[in-house]
Image: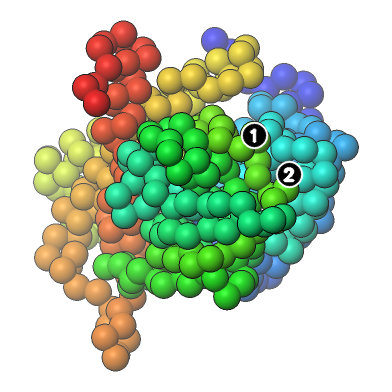
């Protein structure tokens, strides 16, 4: 297989590199690659950076031109993400709006809905959060208990969502609700678009061991949204939600091995400085992580090839998600081995606050990666049933 760019891809890569060279300066460059979809570090700087991306249509670059996008193909999207990682640009903020909701909206939404919501996502005037998980419906999403009933021209919503990333920052939430009170499992669900700034919504932060509180509980008490704010047919929200989850495991992660490779390089540098590389067990683990990044790269290429041929991501997206999340968690554990007893210490800022360095952050935050966007157990079920043809898990 030839992994080299075609002439047109090489020209596009040069265009992207030129744009970063011109715009990634000052506070944007100083922030580096810090921050992420579930991270508030450098928030104000990252908002301004995201708006700059939106103004030049790098937010929404895959959208059709009629909706303000660049209509870039999958290969071009991967090239942009590769160069983004190489440039060490600030962590993206509009992941939930641009990466998850927008492609779902383009697939299932009406023209009126697309023209209402897409421009606000691209200009970063409206941020989105994802209302899927509940206290009793995490990996078992079909057990959703949040309910919505029609009251004239509005849906009235009651229930609770949890692990809602950046809900306290969001203007809108795409919410999976049960609109048929007699339904069970994945039947009778609808995909509602709900404004966050209203009296019927309460957001409570969930502070974690990392010291951050980007996750939230969200309580809906007679919250309301317009009747037309349903994506796809009423009662068929399961199909829409599954499409969103497919996008969550899709192209956004195809080039992330570049960021992981930078993390590994930094860890190796720490190990060389503190003498940890003298331990053959540590050296073996670091070598294994290096091999893992290469596997991740070529698995990503395989995913991209299938995507170009079929236009959809199949079960290989689950293989990729299962692999990289476990690799990253293992890297965090190795980082603690490299630090040794220093891993037990963090910088204390008084009043109970503490600051995590990059290695501690990787160790703690990577634990959640094997859970969100479909837990590792769910990914193994998908691979077993859809790839290996094993019997379905008993219900």
**Location of residue 347 with respect to 99 vertically, above or below:** below
Q: Which residue is mark 2?
A: 60
Do we see residue 362 in this rendering? no
Q: Which residue sits at x=43%, y=36%?
A: 183
**For residue 225, what is the image quadrant?**
bottom right
Q: State the image coordinates of residue 201 (x, y, percent, origin top left).
A: 52, 69
At x 32%, y 15%, the residue is: 385
Q: Please state which of residues 103 and 27 is positioned toward the viewer in this rendering.
A: 103
Q: Residue at x 34, y 46 (%)?
A: 137
**How far is the residue under mark 1 from the one under mark 2?**
25 Å
Quarter of the image with the N terminus is: top right
Tag 2 secondary structure: loop
Using a 10 Å C-alpha cutoff, classify the residue at mark 2 as few (fewer than 14 neighbours), some (14 to 19) or many (20 or more): many
Residue 225 — which label? Answer: none
**Left or right of 144 in this view: 157:** right
Secondary element type, mark 1: loop
Figure quadrant of residue 94 = bottom right
Q: Is residue 222 above or below residue 278?
A: below
The location of residue 211, given as percent across then percent down, is: 33, 72
Which percent across, then down, holds residue 280? 12, 40
Q: Which one is in front, 341 or 204?
A: 204
| Mark toward the viewer: 1 or 2 | 1
Task: Answer above or below: position of 138 versus 255.
Answer: below
Q: Which residue corresponds to the image point at 24% horizontal and 21% vertical from the top-left?
A: 393
Q: Which mark is residue 233?
A: 1
Q: Is residue 147 left or right of residue 89?
A: left
Q: Residues within 10 Å of mark 1 (few under 14, many from 20)?
A: some
Disc with the residue nearer the chain's start (1 vs 2)? 2
- The image position of residue 47, as x and y in percent, is 66, 66
């Amino acid at each position: 297989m030839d992994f080299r760019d075609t002439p047109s891809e090489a020209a596009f890569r040069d265009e992207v590199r030129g744009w970063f060279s011109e715009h990634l300066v000052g506070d944007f460059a100083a922030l580096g690659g810090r921050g992420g979809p579930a991270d508030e570090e450098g928030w104000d700087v990252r908002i301004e950076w995201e708006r700059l991306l939106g103004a030049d249509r790098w937010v929404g670059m895959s959208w059709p031109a009629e909706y303000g996008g660049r209509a870039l193909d999958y290969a071009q999207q991967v090239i942009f993400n590769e160069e983004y990682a190489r440039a060490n640009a600030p962590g993206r903020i509009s992941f939930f709006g641009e990466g998850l909701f927008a492609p779902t909206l383009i697939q299932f939404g009406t023209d009126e809905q697309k023209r209402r919501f897409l421009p606000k996502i691209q200009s970063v005037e409206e941020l989105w959060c994802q209302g899927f998980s509940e206290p009793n419906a995490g990996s078992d999403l079909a057990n959703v208990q949040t309910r919505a009933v029609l009251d004239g021209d509005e849906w009235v919503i009651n229930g609770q969502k949890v692990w809602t990333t950046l809900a306290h920052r969001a203007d809108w939430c795409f919410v999976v609700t049960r609109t048929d009170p007699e339904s069970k499992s994945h039947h009778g669900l609808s995909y509602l678009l709900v404004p966050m700034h209203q009296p019927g919504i309460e957001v409570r932060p969930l502070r974690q061991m990392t010291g951050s509180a980007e996750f939230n509980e969200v309580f809906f008490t007679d919250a309301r949204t317009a009747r037309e704010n349903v994506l796809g047919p009423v009662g068929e929200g399961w199909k829409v939600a599954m499409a969103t989850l497919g996008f969550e495991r899709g192209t956004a992660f195809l080039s992330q091995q570049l960021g992981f490779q930078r993390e590994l390089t930094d860890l190796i540098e720490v190990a060389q400085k503190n003498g940890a590389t003298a331990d053959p067990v540590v050296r073996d683990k670091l070598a294994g992580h290096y091999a893992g990044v290469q596997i991740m790269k070529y698995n990503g290429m395989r995913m991209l090839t299938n995507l170009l041929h079929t236009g959809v991501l199949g079960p290989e997206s689950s293989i990729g998600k299962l692999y990289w999340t476990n690799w990253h968690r293992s890297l965090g554990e190795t980082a603690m081995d490299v630090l040794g007893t220093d891993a037990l210490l963090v910088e204390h800022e008084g009043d109970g606050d503490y600051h995590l360095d990059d290695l501690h952050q990787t160790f703690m935050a990577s634990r959640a990666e094997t859970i969100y966007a479909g837990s590792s157990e769910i990914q193994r079920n998908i691979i077993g049933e859809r790839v290996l043809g094993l019997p379905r898990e008993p219900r």
